[in-house]
Image (cartoon, rainbow, N blue to C red):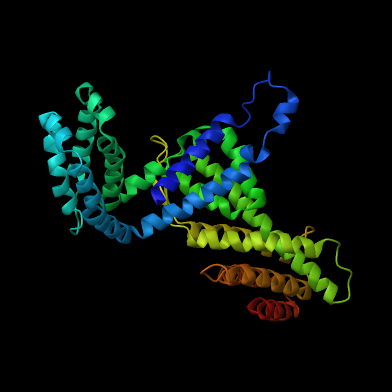
Amino acid sequence: TLVATLQLTRAEVEWWVSHAGAAPKEVPLREREALDRSLFDPATVQALLRYACLLRRLVLREAPVVASSAGTRLSVARLHVLEELLSQLPREKAALPPRAELLLSELPVHLAAAAAPDAQLQGLRLNVLRLVYELSAAPCAALLRRAEALRQLLPELHRLSLLSSAIDQPQRLVDEACDLSPLFASEAKFMQAVYAGALSARPSDCVALLELACAGGVRRPLVDECLGRLSGRFSELLSQTLAALSSRRSGSLGSVAPPGAEASMQAALPKLCALAAALDQSPPLELAADGAATAAARLLPREWMGERLEEHLQQAVRGMLLLPEGKISSPVVVAGQIADLSAALALASHHAGIDLRAALDITMGREFGALSEGGALRDGGEGDGGEGGGGEGGG
């Protein structure tokens, strides 16, 4: 059922790639506008790919359980169905070519052995392929038209092949079911419609899109472009959350908060938390080689998020400490801004398995240490700035 769902998702995405924006100009405008827009909405494709990625992770994570269940079904339920079908074909079996009759007689033996640990069922799939070829040949055409049980045997053979692949080749089975090459080959539709829509409305879906793209072995430049856009979106959401927290703090101190600050907070924070959680929970991404220039590599999204976070924090803390004129900011102002930044990271940390504020501690130690060693904070400013910044940042 899971594999059939993934295959159906792939078919829907391929249909969208083929038909989105492909309405002929000869079709009247009124008829084109009357079409169901949800059929061509990139958000629909985005949701399909999100669930496909979740199902793919589920199958691969629970591969031993899936293999055990498939082995039981093959050796018990499907074996019973096969024996029932064969029992209805005494005359037809005698009329089959000798090779097809021999293959049919060997199938129950293969199915009975499917429940054994570490079963290798390449022989079963090879025999199924040979049997389908024999039944599709001209001598068996009349038998197929005449015997209902023989026609029912063909879809049953397909089920046997799928179940056997779930036992000893789950990775290959899932990769074939999630092969979205037509989507990734159309970079304009993927980047400008699906990925851009995910960046804006649901950035956490970009992690699922990247996972499917890497599993499909797409070109390395496309993956790098996706990662670059996702990095910018991560920094943007963090900046929006920080600005909203600063506005809220200014309002609590008696200042007038800018209009829309609370709405900005409600829009940015859930997306930031969902993106942090998606990056934290994502499995490693296998990046394909790009010719001789770039070798294959493995990307850990959790570490990638930490690196992007440190880069953003380094720029943010330097912007807090150093004014555009080259002057040092007031320690009180810096302490408040660092407190807002710490609060934003604390909110996102609740949804990720790592403490994002640890990166802030490292950045603060590096930046404050550089200022202290350089003697930029003197005449009492060093003690005030270090105490205020350290106390608020620790909070």
User: Which residue is depicted at the point 66% across and 76% down?
Assistant: 393
Q: Nearer the viewer, residue 116 or 305?
A: 116
Q: Position of residue 296 (x, y in %)?
A: 38, 44
How many circles with numbers are drawn on the protein? 0
User: Where, by quadrant of the figure, is residue 68 drawn?
Assistant: bottom left
Q: Quadrant of the C terminus?
A: bottom right
Where residue 376 sits, quadrant-wise, is bottom right
- Measured from the top left, where is residue 336 in percent x and y? 75, 74
Residue at image location 73% in from the left, 63% down from the top: 266
The answer to whether residue 322 is visible is no
The quadrant where residue 379 appears? bottom right
Q: Using the image as rendered, state which of residue 297 and residue 199 is in the foreground.
A: 199
In the image, taking residue 61 as reference, residue 87 lies left or right, namely left
Residue 50 vertical placement versus 322 (above, below) = above
Q: What x and y, as percent, mark residue 176?
A: 37, 41
- Residue 383: x and y in percent read 70, 81
Left or right: 106 in relation to 190: left
